[in-house]
Image (cartoon, grey):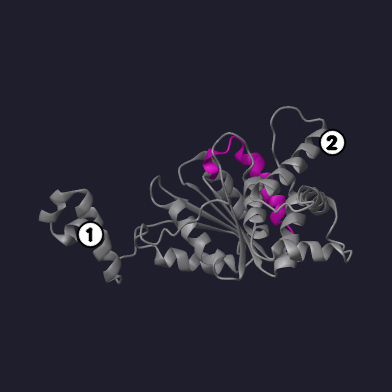
Amino acid sequence: MPYDIQSQKDLIYGRAPDLAHLRRRAKNNGLTVVLGRPQQGKTWLLQELARTLDGSGQFAVGFGRSYGETADLMLRAVQDLYARWLTRAGAWGRVKAALDTPQGWLSGPVKFVVDHLVKAVAGDNALTESMIRQALDALITANKEATGATGFLPTLKYDQARDLVAAVHRLSGHRVVLMMDQYQESPDPEGEAKTLRAFLADCDTWSPCHILLALREQEAAADVMRAMVKERPGRDEIHALGGMALEDDAETRRRLLVEACDRLPALKEVDDADILG
């Protein structure tokens, strides 16, 4: 299944300004790096943003998360993008219809993946998320065989990611947003940054796409991202999570107090203002 982006709106407190800002960022090409302390809600924030964008009918969303095993965040995000998009009603039909009219973009990695899927769904088989992931895995295997690489290195080349993302935009008509969580867990943040840098270098010329990347602010990988953002001032941005914005949100303050008292009953004897600081 695509990455589960269930609603987190009841678990996020005081983050409405952050969500609004990130939604605005997603409407433009570039990179936004969300920095925060451990347990500050970076993952929940990205998941809630992904849910609202994905349900808006204007964005195609891919969500990837690093687990520290391989440097493949771009691959994970693109796999999720295709799994989320192609398993929706009508999407695969539009892809098949496009095959009848030769197009310049239907070449290279896109043609490789589509051809793999056409074979997989031959007959009465229905397109599944597993088939989509297997098609992209086959592309990675082909990369390794072509370069003679050894070991388990499931990386996606930046130009392949570019072509795959551009195809989604052309066929869906939606702006693409790739979300990458726990970047600090990557075993090779420098290598992944190199792929991101090349991917974003000329995205204005080929497809509307924004990347949102979240990580802990005190990790070495955060310094890699800070340096990268400085290379494109005004286009890329660091968004550092601050304190919760509760001053003008009475309902959120109420929900937070209720949850805090449910978890720590002793807080019922403490003044509300002291609890919320």
Which residue of the protein is positioned furthest toward the left in this rendering? 269
Residue 213: image location, x then y, percent: 55, 52
Q: The residue under label 2 is which amino acid type?
A: Ala
Residue 118: image location, x then y, percent: 80, 52
Left or right: where does residue 106 sit relative to residue 180? right
Residue at the image point whose x is 73% and y is 61% from the top: 92
Looking at the image, can residue 247 be seen? no
Q: Which span of residues is magenta-colored?
A: 183-202
Q: Does the magenta stretch include residue 189?
A: yes
Residue 34: image location, x then y, percent: 50, 54
Identify residue for label 1.
257
Which residue of the protein is positioned furthest toward the right in this rendering? 102
Q: Identify the mark nearer the N-term, 2 or 1.
A: 2
Residue 276: image location, x then y, percent: 23, 59
Q: Are marks 2 and 1 in contact (CB under 8 Å)?
A: no
Q: In which quarter of the image is the C terminus?
A: bottom left
Disc 2 is placed on an element classified as helix
| Viewer-side residue, 104 vs 203 | 104
Residue at the image point whose x is 70% and y is 64% from the top: 91
Q: The residue under label 1 is which amino acid type?
A: Leu
Magenta span: chief secondary structure = helix
Identify residue for label 2.
146
| Viewer-side residue, 242 vs 83 | 83
Q: How far apart are marks 2 and 1 (CA)?
A: 58 Å
| Viewer-side residue, 35 vs 42 | 42
Disc 1 is placed on an element classified as helix
| Viewer-side residue, 100 vs 48 | 100
